[in-house]
Amino acid sequence: MGRAFSRACLLAMAGLLTTAALGGCKSGEEAAASDANTMAEVTPQRMEGKLRVKDSWIEVAPLVLHDAKMDLFVRCKIVQEDAKKLGREVPPLCYEPAPRELTAITTIRIERWLNLPIAMRQMQMTAEATHFLVERTGSAYQMLDLVYAVRRDGQVRKDELRIIATDEKGGAAIVGALKLILPNAKVVEADMTSVKPHLGPPDGAGGPGGPGGTGQPGHEGHGHGHEGHDHGDHEGHDHAPALPTPTPTPTPTPTP
């Protein structure tokens, strides 16, 4: 009887020890998982891109490309110089040459276009500019330093950053990056898909597309040959056919 009681007690104690051991193991696993989650939360987001502000760089998560031939700070001045050399009317500069403080920016404007050649031809005709271009593939390019205000609809927009996008996801990524820099800026979306292709201005009278020209707007607009941007018929790149002979009377630009 005594032996049976002692054996029962030992078995009960062994069971309690096993339960405690198992419970301790489970708590350890939960703690490890919690630590892993905490590490994942504090791991900094990978910064693949950079934005140019006052000739310096700010790292951002989305990849933003910079092409010297697409820099409107230079290209829009070339347009004016070419017009002077040819004895033609000099178009206004597509941006405000005096830098502004970031505190002046209160609006992030993102425009949805059918494709970039249409958008760039429209800007070329009206001597306008944009800070960012986003292709259908999601590739994003910074065209102008953020401290320079762009010209749009006949006015310099000192309170605005302008994004022209044909890819919704890529456009949202740029907006997200800008909101980190300008958390108080409101986001305005404009549907420009009703703007149709039309005839361009005489050679040399263009805006941000470079020194005018009547070739394919995707080509002279970006100013970068055949590196896989806005000129192919495949992989979703923006593309437009060669334009017919231009006329000096463009279709008015609809204002959203």
Image (cartoon, grey):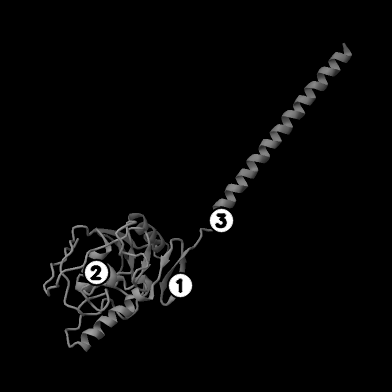
Residue, x 48% and y 63% (percent of image)? 48
Say which quarter of the image contains residue 173.
Answer: bottom left
> Going by the image, does 180 lie left or right of 207?
right
Residue 4, x across and y down, in percent: 85, 14
Dot 2 alpha-carbon crowd within 10 angstroms: few under 14, some 14 to 19, many 20 or more: some
- Asked if 237 appears above or below 102 in the picture, the reply is above
Give the CA separation, mark 3 to mark 2. 45 Å
Sequence-first tag of 3 and 2 = 3
In the orientation shown, which residue stands out farthest toward the top? 1
Say which quarter of the image contains residue 239.
Answer: bottom left
Dot 3 alpha-carbon crowd within 10 angstroms: few under 14, some 14 to 19, many 20 or more: few
Residue 152, x across and y down, in percent: 23, 70
Say which quarter of the image contains residue 134.
Answer: bottom left
Sequence-first tag of 2 and 1 = 1
- Residue indicated by mark 2: 216
> Going by the image, does 122 lie left or right of 10?
left
Residue 43 - label? 3
Residue 57 - label? 1
Sequence-first tag of 3 and 1 = 3
Residue 183, x across and y down, in percent: 39, 62
- Does dot 1 land on a helix, a strand or a loop? strand
Q: Name the residue type under label 2.
A: Gln
Residue 141, x across and y down, in percent: 37, 67
- Does dot 2 land on a helix, a strand or a loop? loop
